[in-house]
């Protein structure tokens, strides 16, 4: 199955997705993401260096493909994990051409699933700035 193959490849690249996505797993990843973002302005985020590690660039590609798989399989419960992992990877290793996608997904998650509309809007706007700065 494609989703299992992508998860296995992500694991080989040092990026783990939970086998079973639970609310606890999502909350834990959400807390990690918020901790990484704490105190970072939009200007600082847009100015982050480019991602240079080819394994992390490939991981970002695989995260985006896994999100599509979750979408088509109807696994909406697992979707937030992808957004959270993409943002975490971007903050740790730099911004790739897919960083904007990760921040857009994160903003949607905050606004639609968590009810944090203003914060979600902030990250969607940031995503647009990143996409202009680092075209895919």
Image: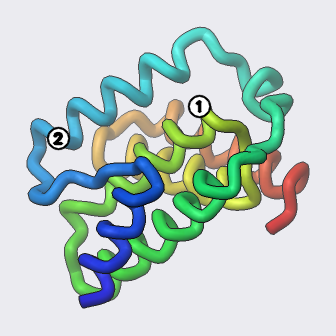
Q: Badge 2, how many Cα within 10 Å: few under 14, some, many 20+?
A: some
| Quarter of the image where the C terminus is located | bottom right
| Quarter of the image where the N terminus is located | bottom left
SS at badge 2: helix
Measured along the vertical axis of the image, is residue 71 above or below residue 79? below
Task: Find out whether the residues at labels 2 and 1 contact each other: C-beta distance under 8 Å.
Answer: no
Measured along the vertical axis of the image, is residue 118 above or below residue 129? above
Quote the CA–CA distance across marks 2 and 1: 20 Å
Based on the displayed image, in which of its 4 quarters is residue 132 positioned? bottom right
**Which of the two labelled residues, at mark 2 and mark 1, occupies the earlier sequence position?**
2
Of 118 and 36, which appears nearest the observer? 36
- Percent coordinates x, y for residue 43 in the rendering: 82, 24
SS at badge 1: helix
> At x 14% / y 54%, what residue is drawn?
21
How many marks do you count on the picture?
2
- Percent coordinates x, y for residue 76 in the rendering: 24, 68
> At x 32% / y 33%, what residue is drawn?
30
Would you say residue 72 is visible in this rendering? yes
Residue at the right extreme of this rendering: 133
- For residue 2, side relative to residue 111 (left or right): left
Measured along the vertical axis of the image, is residue 39 above or below residue 63? above
Residue at the top extreme of this rendering: 39
* Disc 1 target residue: 92
- Percent coordinates x, y for residue 35 in the rendering: 43, 17
> At x 48% / y 76%, what residue is drawn?
65
* Disc 2 target residue: 25
> At x 51% / y 31%, what residue is drawn?
119
């Amino acid at each position: 199955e494609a989703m299992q193959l992508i998860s296995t490849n992500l694991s080989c690249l040092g990026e783990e997705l939970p086998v079973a996505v639970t609310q606890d797993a999502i909350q834990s990843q959400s807390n990690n993401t918020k901790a990484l973002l704490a105190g970072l302005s939009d200007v600082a985020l847009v100015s982050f260096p480019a991602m240079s590690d080819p394994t992390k660039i490939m991981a970002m590609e695989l995260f985006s493909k896994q999100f599509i798989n979750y979408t088509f399989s109807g696994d909406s419960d697992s979707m937030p994990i992808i957004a959270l992992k993409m943002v975490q990877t971007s903050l740790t290793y730099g911004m790739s051409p897919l960083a904007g996608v990760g921040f857009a997904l994160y903003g949607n998650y905050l606004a639609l699933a968590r009810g944090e509309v203003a914060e979600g809007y902030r990250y969607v706007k940031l995503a647009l700035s990143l996409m202009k700065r680092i075209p895919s």
